[in-house]
Image (cartoon, rainbow, N blue to C red):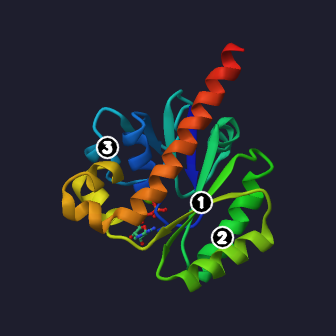
Amino acid sequence: MVISVINKKGGVGKTPFAFSIAKDLDMFLQSNDNSIIESIYPNKAKISKEPSLLENCVYDFGGFVDKGILDIVRQSDMLIIPCNELYNSILRTIETINEIQTLNKNIIVLVSDYKDEKDKNIIEEMLKSNLSDLEFFFFKHSKIIDNAMIAGLSFTELYNENVLSKLNYKNFFEEYNKLLHTLTKTKENKNVKKWA
Ligand SMILES: Nc1ncnc2c1ncn2[C@@H]1O[C@H](COP(=O)(O)OP(=O)(O)OP(=O)(O)O)[C@@H](O)[C@H]1O
Ligand SMILES: [Mg+2]
């Protein structure tokens, strides 16, 4: 399975989500953007300006998107687009989706880093009125995002650390676990098709 986490907008959480998904699903991780992934995910993460297409890999695409990257986007089994509540971020997200939807229609949007239900509804409404056929997951602001990068642990690993972490990260983890299940199902369906 190949997953691309992509958004032109920076600071939306591409790297933490890409890292955590790769680690939890035991996948490789490649990025075209500078980050600490090679040190927190040794042997399985690689940064390169021109990443190559690899089976069982999550791609974290930040910065400039060139042709080689669009080829990987086209061949991905799923595109994951994180977006936060900033107006500019929503606009850039709509722009990104409009551009890549022509290449690949399997898109999951992560509405992330919002503070309350009101903000969540505004983002969802804005995205849904400008785009169609998208699947949404919702991640309220949580320290788990920064902690994953600091500790080099996936969201599942952080959640399972102790009783307190299970309490603190409960809502975030429930939604994340649903996302992992959706991705696992995508992988199973792909394998069924391959052998059918
Ligand atoms: N649910 C959330 N809770 C807390 N922070 C979040 C959440 N979702 C996204 N973030 C943001 O993600 C940031 C970390 O992600 P990062 O800046 O690496 O994103 P990125 O999209 O990879 O950016 P870049 O394009 O610069 O590489 C945090 O500082 C925070 O602002
Ligand atoms: Mg990044």
Separation of residues labelled 2 and 1 (CA atoms)? 8 Å
Q: Which mark is residue 92?
A: 2
Q: Considering the numbered disc 1 on the image, is that residue within a helix, a strand or a loop?
A: loop
2 or 3: tag closer to the N-terminus: 3
Residue at coordinates 64% horizontally, 74% vertically from top-left?
90
Residue 180 location in percent, x, y?
49, 45
Q: Is residue 91 left or right of residue 14?
A: right
Residue for badge 1: 7
- Disc 2 crowd, CA 10 A, few/some/many (<14, 14-19, 20+): some
Q: Amino acid at mark 3?
A: Glu
3 or 1: tag closer to the N-terminus: 1
2 or 1: tag closer to the N-terminus: 1
Residue at coordinates 58% horizontally, 54% vertically from top-left?
6
Residue 50 location in percent, x, y?
53, 39
Above or below, comparing residue 190 to residue 38 in the picture? above
- The total of numbered circles placed on residues is 3
